[in-house]
Image (cartoon, rainbow, N blue to C red):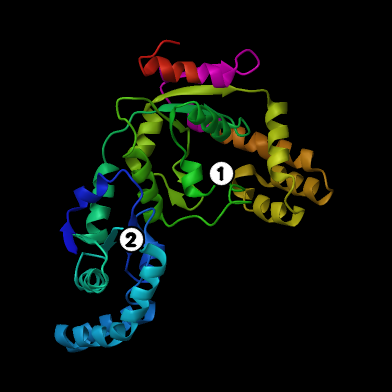
Amino acid sequence: MLKLIQISDWLVQTEPVVLLDIRSEGEYLQGHIPGAISFPILNNEERKLVGTCYKQKGHEEAVVLGYKLVGPKFYGFIELAYKEFKGKEIFIHCWRGGLRSQIMGNVLSTAGFKVNLIKGGYKLYRTQVLEYLSQEFTFEVLGGFTGCRKTEILEEIHLKGAQVLNLEYLASHKGSAFGYLGMPNQPSQEHFENLIFEKLRRFNSNLPIWIEDESRLIGRVQVPDAIYGGIRSSFVHFLDIPFEKRLNQIINSYGRFPADVLVEITSKLKKRMGDQANRNAIDFLNQGDIKGWAEIVLKHYDKQYLFGFSKRESTLSMNINLEEVDIINYLTGINNNKNGQLV
């Protein structure tokens, strides 16, 4: 059975389903609906051939070439679908919900699968993403100098029921120049936005959403303008943790990486750190003195963060002294109170 559905029908799905993205591998890597399985009807090279044919010879010739390339692969699609998705309902999309998805839908439906074609395809999905991410956002922001364990603390309150948008996790990057170390490859900007959308749209908008005080860029991806605006205009719970403790956190996080890698990254900070400070930091690394290096780098990032933080409205922040407060219980209490619960 083959059924055409609206993107709105897809977005209200609450249970995990089989979603096949039948665009080429390159299109999928550029950005896809999170959770979609790459199931290309035309690979990168075949798609290029059909596109070239369309420009040079027109629609009919391109359709004929498309079927010529795809036809011999029909049995393989069915064989793989029986192996991986037997007995399951299947959702399919291509770029615009056009010929590619119609062909695959017909192939799998005639093989006995219940198939849903998403009208408008990935293009319409992206329209939904961009429209959603353009609205105004208000957050509960967790701030603090580098080494405060902000990300870890947010994950801990998430386990206690708080809604947390962990941008660094979604970006596969910890934010600083060293933030890619030990992390998976970053997503494309497009896919980063998709990941944020999928996370946010499942939150209860009437309850607090917690987020880390991020800069505009996280590695090579940019925080969407409205999200960044929300971070900058929302209340900040600033973690006040002693320098020495933060220093130990930095040493534990980055001291395990090879010195030559740290030297290469540190050298790129020369313009912002200043020549002398940068040279001293690199000298410490060459001497095997990780603590000496970390002290200089941490002071550099403290100055950067303080500069950005000073531009905020002073009434929109509050210091939390970690020497005096159980931070997890404290933030959980704030979250529950804003939920309207007793604390």
Query: What residue sits 27% from the left and 82% below the top?
Result: 50
Residue 153 is situated, as x and y percent measured from the top left of the image, at: 56, 29
> In this rendering, does residue 76 appear at all?
yes
Badge 1 element:
loop
- Does the segment drawn in magenta span residue 84? no
Q: Is residue 162 left or right of residue 227?
A: right
Q: Provide residue 327's location: percent of width, then percent of height.
A: 57, 20
Up/down of 186 relative to 205, above or below: below
Residue 308 on the magenta span: yes
Location of mark 1 (residue): 174
In the rendered view, tell whether residue 1 sits above or below residue 268: below
Q: Which residues are magenta?
A: 306-331
Q: Give coordinates of residue 252: x percent, y percent.
A: 72, 39
Q: Residue at x 43, y 20 (%)?
A: 335
| Residue depicted at x 48% and y 16% | 333
Q: 126 or 37: which is nearer to us?
A: 37
Q: Mark 2 falls on what kind of element?
A: loop
Q: Which residue is outermost to the top?
A: 342
Q: Which mark is residue 87?
A: 2
Q: Are marks 2 and 1 in contact (CB under 8 Å)?
A: no
Type of amino acid under label 1: Lys
Mark 2: amino acid: Gly
Residue in the foreground of this view, choosing between 139 and 238: 139
**x and y, in percent, of residue 242 in the image:** 67, 23
Mark 2 Cα-neighbour bin, 10 Å: few <14, some 14–19, many ≥20:
few
